[in-house]
Image: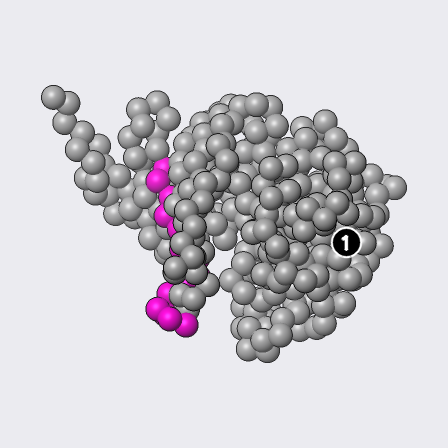
Amino acid sequence: MQTLLLDPDAVEEAAEMSAVVSAVEDAFVADARGDAQMPAKSYIDLPQYNGDFRSMPAYLDAGEWDAAAVKWVNVHPDNPDDHDLPTVMGTVVYSDPETAFPLALLDGTTITRKRTGAAAAVATNHLAVEHARTMGIVGAGVQSYTQLEAIATVRPIEEVVVADRDDERVAEFIEAFEDRFDVRGGSIEEAARCDVLSTVTPVEEPIVHSVGDHTHVNAIGADAAGKHEIADEILLDATLVIDDYEQCTHSGEINVPWSEGVLSDDDIHGELGEVIVGEKPGRTPETGVTVFDSTGLAIQDVAASHVVYEYAAEHDVGERVSLVDTDVL
C-alpha cells in the first residue's frame, strides 16, 4: 500500500468547496450525536521562538463514512519578517480508521483555510437570514477568500464590502472576485451592516462596535486567549452560537468577556452541532443578530481531509509514495 502526498495545489484541486461544506456539517452532526472523538487541542509553547505547535487529532463516524486524522500546526508570528515563511503552517496525516494505515499526507494550511470557511458557511446556513445578499468581511488576508467562497455556496451573495487597513490587500481581494460579485472596499461600519459579516483579524481590542439589526456574524479571528474582535455589547445582545465550549471559553471570541465575567453560560445559545440536529433552534422570524464563535475543530480537519482524499484517490491527484514499512514479520 502507498500513501498519497498532496501538496497545496493538489489539495486546492481536490477540495471542492460545496463538498467540504457538506462534510463539515456532517462532522458537527457526528459530534453532537456522540459519534466523534476529539481530544483537547494540545500546545507546545516555544517562547524562545515566539511561537507554538498545536496537535489536533480526531475521529468521526458520519454514518456513510468514517475517518481519522491529526493536524500538526504552528503559529510563529515572526516567520514572515525573520524567515520569509508563513506565520501558520500545517500538515495533516489522514489515516484509515480500520487499519491505521496513513492514506494521505496533506498540506494542512490549505485544509485549514478550506474547513474554516466551510464552518462559517454551515453556521451561516443555519443562522443568517434566508435571502442574505450582502456580505461584509473585516480583514483581507488569506482566510477572507475562503470565507466568501464558502458562504456563497449557501446564500445568494451579490454584494461584498471588504475592510482592511492595507489598501493593497483590499485591491487584491477585489481583483480576485470582481468577476463574480459586486465587491468594493469600505469601512468596518459599512461591512458590519451587511446581512452576513465575517471577521478574520488577530486583534485583541474589539474593532466591530455595531452591526445591522439582523446581521449574522462569523467571528473567526480569535484563536488564542486575549484575542477579541466583537464588542461585548453585541455578544450580549446576540443569539450566540459556539463551535466548542472548552475551546471558545479558552481561546475563542468569547474568551475575554468570559474571563472577565461579562459573559456566562446563560448567554450562550448552544453549540453549532446542537443547532444543526435541532436540539437548539436556529434563526427564527424573531431572531435579531446572531454570532458564531469559530475556533476551528479537529473534526473539521478530518472532514475536509476526507473530501480531499476521496477526490484525489478517484482522480489520480497527488503523488503515491511508500511512506511506511508494511512488511509483516
Is residue 236 inside the magenta stretch? no
- Residue sitting at 55 percent across and 49 percent down? 116
- Is 311 rendered above or below residue 193? above
Q: Is residue 28 above or below residue 167?
A: above
Using the rendered view, name the quadrant where residue 202 is placed: bottom right
Q: Residue furthest right?
A: 286
Residue plotted at (48% across, 49% down): 112
Label 1 environment density (alpha carbons within 10 Å; few <14, some 14–19, many ≥20): many
Say if residue 59 shows up in the picture: yes
Rendered residue at 67%/35% (across/down)? 271
Residue 51: image location, x then y, percent: 43, 57
Quarter of the image with the C terminus in it: top left
Callout 1 secondary element = helix
Residue at 33 percent of width and 53 percent of height: 7
Image mark count: 1
Name the residue that disc number 1 marks. 232
Residue segment shown in magenta: 81-94
Q: Is residue 270 left or right of residue 12?
A: right
Left-right relation of 306 to 191: left
Can residue 130 be seen in this snapshot?
Answer: no
The spot of residue 305 in percent (x, y) is: 42, 41
User: Foreground residue, 328 or 254?
Assistant: 254
The reply, left or right, for residue 321 in relation to residue 276 is left
Q: Relative to residue 149, is residue 268 drawn left or right?
A: right
Q: From the image, which quarter does the N terminus lie in?
A: top left
Hey, what amino acid is under mark 1? Asp
Relative height, residue 134 to residue 41 (above, below): below
| Residue 103 position in % (x across, y down) | 31, 36
Q: Extreme bottom residue here?
A: 167
Question: Which of the pair 241/26 is nearer the observer?
Answer: 241
Say how the picture is coloured: one colour
